[in-house]
Structure formats: C-alpha cells, structure tokens
Image: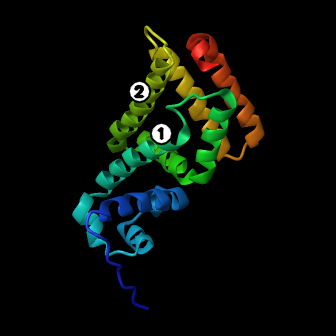
Amino acid sequence: MVTVARRVAYGEGRDLLISTTVDVVAERGLRGLTFRAIADRAGVNNSLIAHHFGTREALLAAALEWAVEQSIESSGLLDLASEQVFADTLLDAVSRRPQLQAFQYEMILEARRNELFRAPVAKLYTRYHEVVIESLRHYGVDGDVDALARSTFAALDGLVLQYMAGVDPEELRAALVQVWTSLRPVLGTSAA
C-alpha cells in the first residue's frame, strides 16, 4: 500500500512536526522516535522533517520548548486563582494532554544518558522557574523568591509525575491544594 503525503499549508509544517514528535515520544518513548514514525503519523514526507530541523536533536530541542510553553499555558501556573481552581486547572490540563508531560519526563531522563539534551532540559527547568517567580511577583511577593519558586515547582513537578504514574487524582488534588495553601502566608491577602 502506498501512502500519499498530505499537503501542509505554508507555515504549518513546523508546528505539525513538533506536536507529532511530542505524541510519538509520549507513546513510544525516544527509542520509537524516527523521522519515518513522525512522517507517517503526521501524514507528510519525511524530508519535511530534515528541511525544518536537520537533526533529531534539533527536532527534540524544539519539541521540548514547545511542550513546556503548551504546559505553562494550560496549567494555570500563571494564575494562582484559588486553592481549588488551581488544583482543578492543573489536573485538568494534565489529563487533557498527558503527552506533554510524558514527553518532558522522557527528555529529562534522556538528559541523564545523553549530554546533548542537558542544556535543553536545564532550559526547561529555568523556564518553569521563571513562570513560578512571575506568578509569585503577581501576588506581591517581594525580595528573593528564588528558593521559594524552586521548591514550589519541585512540589508541583513531583505531583504531576505521580499523576502520570496513576496515583489517585483526589489524593493529588488535596496535595495541590496544600501546596497552594502553604503559599498563602507569603502571598498575603491578595491570594485569599
């Protein structure tokens, strides 16, 4: 059977390849990632991948940046509205698009084995750290919030990983509410 590559509108090919890469890695792991697997899933010719990215490493680095931004946008990290809203928004975002988290965790593990991915993974954590700092500043937290932001994100990261592993969502919701609640004294009355 011959598969005919679909035509992709100008300017949409790169994003299609990135989102497809995230899906393939989330489903098959990095060992299952080939240009052919991406092309087949996206319905395009695999030369489009080489055209846009050149190498597998460049494709994965671009996909990692994209996945981080998609996660931030959908997670509620920028809006600590209330304990319950924050917990619900975060868990809902992960349940709707678990492939974003699965892909990021795959890349984090790969960075331990392959130093080519250490810088992109460090960039991932830097970006999340910046977003948590921005959120804390939004609620009026002054001074050095570096350690607070890092520890807050570490708690959230761990809870999301547990969710991905199948821990009871209600237990995790309660833990997420507790993370938010523990921030309340620092955030002041604007977070109540």
Does residue 39 lie above or below 150 as drawn?
Answer: below
- Count of number-bearing discs: 2
Image spot of residue 132 (x, y percent): 48, 26
Please determine whether, in this image, residue 37 is positioned above or below residue 174: below
- Quadrant placement of the N terminus: bottom left
Looking at the image, residue 167 sits to the left or right of residue 43; the answer is right
The answer to whether the residues at label 2 and label 1 have Cβ atoms under 8 Å apart is no
* x and y percentages locating residue 16 in the rendered image: 38, 63
- Asked whether, in this view, residue 116 is left or right of residue 183, the answer is left
Of residues 104 and 137, which is closer to you in this image?
137
State which quarter of the image contains the C terminus.
Answer: top right
Q: Position of residue 149 (x, y in %)?
A: 50, 21
User: Which of the numbered marks, if any, corresponds to residue 152?
Assistant: none
**Alpha-carbon distance for marks 2 and 1?**
11 Å
User: Hey, what amino acid is under mark 2?
Assistant: Glu
Q: Which residue is mark 1?
A: 72
Residue positioned 70% across, 24% down in the render: 178
Tell me if mark 1 has few (under 14), some (14-19) or many (20+) residues whose alpha carbon lies within 10 angstroms of its own: some
> To which quarter of the image does residue 13 belong?
bottom left
The one of 121 and 97 positioned closer to us in this rendering:
97
* Quarter occupied by residue 86: top right
Q: What residue lies at 35% left-to-right and 79% top-to-bottom?
A: 6
Identify the mark at residue 130; answer none if there is no mark: 2
Q: Amino acid at mark 1?
A: Ile
- Secondary structure beneath label 1: helix
